[in-house]
Amino acid sequence: MKLIYRYMKPYKKVIGCVMGIKLLGAMTELLLPYILEHIIDVTVPSGKLLMVFFWGFVMIATAVVTRLFNVLANRQAVENAHNISYRIRQDLFARTINLSGSQFDFYGLPSLISRMTSDSYNVQSCVQSIQTLCVRAPIMLLGGIVVTLTMDRVLASVLCVMLPILLAVVAGVSRYGIPLYNKVQEGLDDVVRIMRENISGIRVVKALSKADYEKRRFSESNDRMTARDIKAGSVMALPGPIMQLSLNVGLTLVVFIGASRVNSGEMEPGVILAFLTYFNMILQSVMALNRIFMMISKASASADRIALILDIPEDQKVLLPEEAKQPAGEEFIRFEHVYFRYGEMDSGRPEDFAGSGRENCLEDIDFALKKGESLGIIGPTGCGKTTVVNLLMRFYDASEGGVFVDGQDVRTYQKDVLHRKFGVVFQNDMVFNDTLRRNISFGREVTEEQLAEAARDAMAAEYISRLSEGFDYMADIKGANLSGGQKQRLLIARALAADPEILILDDSSSALDYKTDAALRKAIASHHQDTTIILIAQRVSSVMNMTNILVMDDGRCIGYGNHAHLLQTCPQYKEIFETQMGALT
Amino acid sequence: MPGPGDRGRKKEKPKDARGTLRRILRYLKEYRWIVAVLTVCAFASNIGNLLGPGFAGKAIHAAGAGRGRVDFDVVFYYGRCMLIAYILSSLLTFLVNMGMMRVSRHVAQKIRKDVFDKLMTLPVGYFDRNQAGDIISRVSYDVDVVTTCLSTDVVQIITSVITVIGSFVMMCVISLPLVTCMLITIPMAVLYTRYMGRRTRPLYSRRSKAYGSMNGFVEEMFSGQKTILAYAYEDGVCEEFSAINHEAADAYRDADSLGMTMGPSIGFINNLGLSLIGLLGAVFYLWKWVDLGQISSFVLYSRKFSGPINEIANIINEIYSALAAAERVFYMLEEPEEVQDIYGAKTLDHVRGDVEMKEVSFGYVPGKTVLHSLDLEAKEGQTIAIVGPTGAGKSTIINLLMRFYDVDQGAVFVDGNEIRTVTRDSLRRSYAMVLQDTWVFGGTIYENIAYGKEGASMDEVVAAAKAARIHSYVMRLPEGYQTVISEDGGNISKGQKQLLTIARAMLYDTRMLILDEATSNVDTGTERQVQQAMRRLMKGKTCFVIAHRLSTIQNADKILVVDHGDVVEQGTHEELMLQKGFYYRLYASQFE
């Protein structure tokens, strides 16, 4: 909720205005019944037609003014909500895009997306409603209570009976109703999970003729969810009628008590009627407050989720040269006895986050590459190959040891300066919903020539030229209209386009056949001689021609050297080589 | 209000509202008596609500006699009437809410079941063409919209209509002349609402669209966050987002600031009505057409009358979006199903495993043939290796063998039976299949292995697991065979997953086998186990292998070389090497 206040603050004057206008509107609105009452009770019996017309026009004029106030206030409220939500979204987006690797992983993609979409939406409607709704109901409530108390205290005591009941209903719903809905949500998750399983495994299900079995399985979870839904629905069906009933019982009580008080002469008869009107007003505003309360609690949960992201501290400070480590050699890229563990950064992660334990993901990784050399990294999945790249590009900071690029600790570089040295293709990298041209240039100044050259070296020129729109061909979301091989070649073109000093290809030719893969490596080797290349692969054939090969297992280096050297010294490498050679695709 | 995550889908108009409504009514048919009773209850509850103020008025009138002259009998009589009317009305409201809620949940349950059952009958091609997320959102989101509409909006419509008609009748009864005031304000309200509706609708749909594209952009950029960072493109992306964010915010402002004038304006029309009642009432009073009490009651009822009128426009919007949602669901229920087995189709049993493809042509899209007149013969117990570059169409052959798709020309035979003359179930049951994309579902390891053979005993499962060399691994897990694994298999490695699906195929024990070898090794230890297990599984079976490993290929009885969807060469390894054709070049390229 603090977040909402924080963003509303710059607009506090305008918001104050809105509320003021709304207040005026509410007051003129309250005037209307009085005028009507005056017409009926005083003017009409007096029989003065002129006065009737006078008061009639006053009433219409008041109605016009009321509309004017309300429209004015509403419009300005929308305008404020518009400005505030724009700024919240912009800040949240910028913060999220700039999160470090470990921070991003910690919150996870779906949660970050939903903060950006549904949470920011909840906040927006709350900001708007606070300005428009929060004036009327409290005024009605306060005004109603004050007036009834001054009218007749005994009758007002009926309120003391009804209000606790209403409050109990509100409390009961939030205490018992909401947990039931969580159960429903879990049930729905189950239903969706089974559905997803069946969609992804449809071939297996069909091959094994398990359709009937799956129908039963789905049916069970569907029934379970429905039962929970009905239970929650039954609880939620209660408050409406109960509130309505207590309101009406209250009214009846007022009539009974009022009648006896009139009879004993303690009260004027007219008071009963007036009392009923105010009574109605009070109870209505209690219900309205209940709705506002529920809305605010929903929005404040959302606001907290957004604030959590906005308040994440920057976890990777740029170090001054004197704070940083000095490399022990002058090679272009150096890893010096690097260790890495996840979950070490105090970057807004809760203390209890143990993740997959604090085991070393990397242990004593040590290598050095001269400019123009190439490094192949090979090893089983999950052995830490990608982590090497993550440290080199400073998505994470090494736990121990030093990582150096061009004679400088990576931690001394401005993030963007460091990243501009690289051209990189990650595992399962993204093709964006944009033209191929913009996918390749990707925000950098790339000339038409460089573009064509990059596409040619990445073996992508041929298929792009076959497309009718060429480089202006629109790629679908995640490149759905390109084949796996086409996507990978496009991504490689992106990596090559700005002539990077360091080229990183992480398992990015897996969808290419041997022929294309070989041609690609040849093209890169001949046209990018000064580029230092790091290539992560699972196929020996991809790395065997590299100047250096790092064989990894379980976060450790189990072999380092060139192909011939490794065949001699590293039995695991020899084994992979032997099982793999002779594969055809 | 369009939600944030709906990617601009709400507020659409259904294309065939009438037809969709009919289908919803068909779902309600089962509950027609309940719904009828509930409608009557809703009616009665509203009548009670309408009568309440009348009784209250009479009781107050009696109480208003003044000191010592109050006729308590009358007060209590009407007070009781009032209490009873209100209590009954509340009870009935509760009953109606409950009833409609239950009915709508059961309808939702039925729709979900129908959708799922339908999914199970759809051809595999449907799943190749449609995204899982899209299908799932129909079951979760769209069905939910329909349910909410059924359980709340329908009741509200009934209530509103009754209240409006009821209070109108009461107003006519009280004073026909005063009703003329309403003749001015009602058309005003209706015309205004329609006018505003026309003006706001395009703005709201622009708003939905803007939110939709913003959500899409956010999802895409967050998914590619690491890439964006790596290319130092954060600022550029933020700028792009700023434009999109602006458009969304502006669309929101334009739509809502117009939309927000609706409420006060309708309020104004109501207040205008009140003023008119006051004015005309006064005039009529002077002409002795009405008395004061009548004016008061008329005011009360005119308030009741105008309330729902404001709501109805909203509700109609909701109903439209529910119809649009329902239409999307029903649209899916109408997808063409897998072709029915022909009449009198045989059940394929005691399969030997002779498979033959004769002059088979096939294309996924009409006019784009990917297999041209393919001939292939696999004798009982033979191994056929299918090789070729990625995307060459290797899996197409598998799709045809399993009859996931039907051939366009030619025919496929198993043991001399044309496969379209046997039941699809029995055909598929005679193959076991191990795919590269190993599929496990959320359940215990036991359930996953026993999946192909319902009611398999634990001994059988253990035997299969032992044959697949995964038994000792399973025994090391905390709960052994009862360990629960999840769909994405997060708690079990890729290699173990492969072994698990091999065990599943072992248990299934058929004469024919379809195998998709993994392209890259997982880790050398597991890799060897997987290979051994596969060998064991293939023994004595007719096997179709999408092969990546030289040892598999060299041992195959026949190699099918596929390129660009065509079978370019066929033969044994030696024969093909001698041909010095595509296979030879493919083989040689890895040593470059």
Image (cartoon, rainbow, N blue to C red):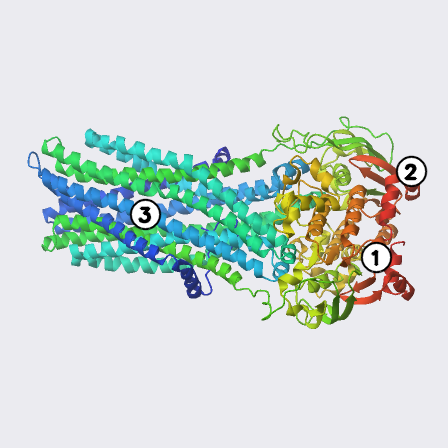
What is the residue that sits farthest to the top in this orientation? A323
> Taking A62 as reference, is B413 left or right?
right
Residue at image mark 1:
B553
Q: CA distance from mark 3 to mark 2?
A: 81 Å
What residue sits 13% from the left and 33% below the top? A260
A522 shown above or below B571: above
What is the residue that sits farthest to the left in this orientation? B69
Give the label, 3 or 1, closer to the camera.
1
Residue at image mark 3:
B95
Chain-order first, disc 3 or disc 1? 3
Residue at image mark 2:
A569
> Taking A252 as reference, is A317 left or right?
right
Residue type, numbered disc 2: Thr
- Chain letter of disc 2? A
Please rate how many residues cluster around mark 2, counting C-alpha atoms within 10 Å: few if below 14, some from 14 to 19, many from 20: some
Q: Quadrant of residue A145?
A: top left
Q: CA distance from mark 3 to mark 1?
A: 71 Å
Q: Under tag 1, what secondary structure? A: helix
Work out whether residue B399 or residue B263 is closer to the camera in this orientation and state it.
B399
Work out whether residue B450 or residue B17 is closer to the camera in this orientation and state it.
B450
Please rate how many residues cluster around mark 1, counting C-alpha atoms within 10 Å: few if below 14, some from 14 to 19, many from 20: many
Q: CA distance from mark 1 to mark 2?
A: 30 Å
- Chain letter of disc 3? B
Quarter occupied by the C terminus of chain A:
bottom right
- Do the dots labelled 1 and 2 sit on one chain? no
- Chain letter of disc 1? B
What residue sits 65% from the left and 52% below the top? B452
Query: Which percent across, then down, holds residue A499?
Result: 80, 49
Work out whether residue A338 or residue B569 is closer to the camera in this orientation and state it.
B569
Dot label at residue B502: none
